[in-house]
Image (cartoon, rainbow, N blue to C red):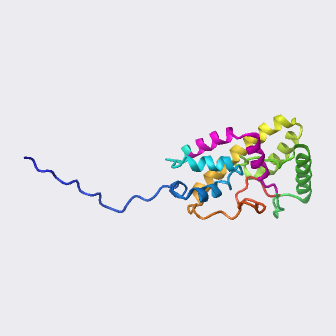
Amino acid sequence: MPSHRAIPAPSGPPASPGPLEPLNTAPADEAQRTLLTCCGSSHWARRLAAHRPYPDLDALLAAADEAAYDLTPADLAEALAAEPFEPAVAPGSASTAAATALRAAHAAYESRFGHAFVICLDATAPSEALDHLLASLRDRLGNDPEEELAVAADELRRAARARLTRLVHNWPDISVPHPSRQPDPPRATRSDSPYVPV
């Protein structure tokens, strides 16, 4: 009778966990709270948390896109209400006149559309971000409300992707609730906001 040889155990240190390990293994409520820092829709965050584990960032981003495309009008309103638009004057980044123009344009936008202006500037060079932001604000003020809601929803989806990418690469301890999103108090400005400081 042939003898069976034992398969040797692998030598060396165990493989280190991947960048999605904290998200994949966090308790559902903690994962949802952290995901809400990327998009303020409770439905979006619950859906992403429920579909874990994700094998890689591409799978997570694909799930995020799908969840964003499926937002109901109420979900979208909740997400837009959570978006900050609180540009602070940063020395050397822009003149006081530009900061005033930005605030005035945003006030006009909020008055017309009833929510904060959303734009993802991740693909824009920092030196061009302020000009792009002001030009986009002024251009989108000419949209009708239905058209602008579609544009804002797409920018929200793009911003959520960018925030998720930063979250995976920069926030390894996802199990710790992020202080910028709590259930009841007003939401604080995201430290990774896609808006350019002015």
Residue closer to the observer: 22 or 18: 22
The residue lying at 76 percent from left, 40 percent from top is 73
x and y percentages locating residue 198 in the rendered image: 83, 58
Viewer-nearest residue: 73 or 92: 73
Tell me what residue is drawn at x 63 percent, y 63 percent.
177
Snapshot quadrant of residue 36? bottom right
Q: Residue at x 53, y 49 (%)?
A: 52
**Which one is nearer the viewer's eye here, 134 or 13?**
13
Residue 16: image x %, image y %?
A: 43, 59
In the drawing, does residue 73 fall left or right of residue 56?
right
Q: On the rendered structure, is 155 left or right of 56?
A: right
Placement of 120 over or under 84, stated as above or below? above
Residue 50 placement (x, y as % from top left)? 57, 48
- Is residue 16 inside the magenta stretch? no
Residue 1, x across and y down, in percent:
7, 46
Question: What secondary structure is the stretch in magenta mostly built from?
Answer: helix
Q: Residue at x 78, y 42 (%)?
A: 152
- In the drawing, does residue 37 fall left or right of residue 97? left
| 48 up-or-down from 139: above or below | below
Total labels: the figure holds 0
Q: Is residue 81 left or right of residue 95?
A: left
Q: Which residues are magenta?
A: 60-85
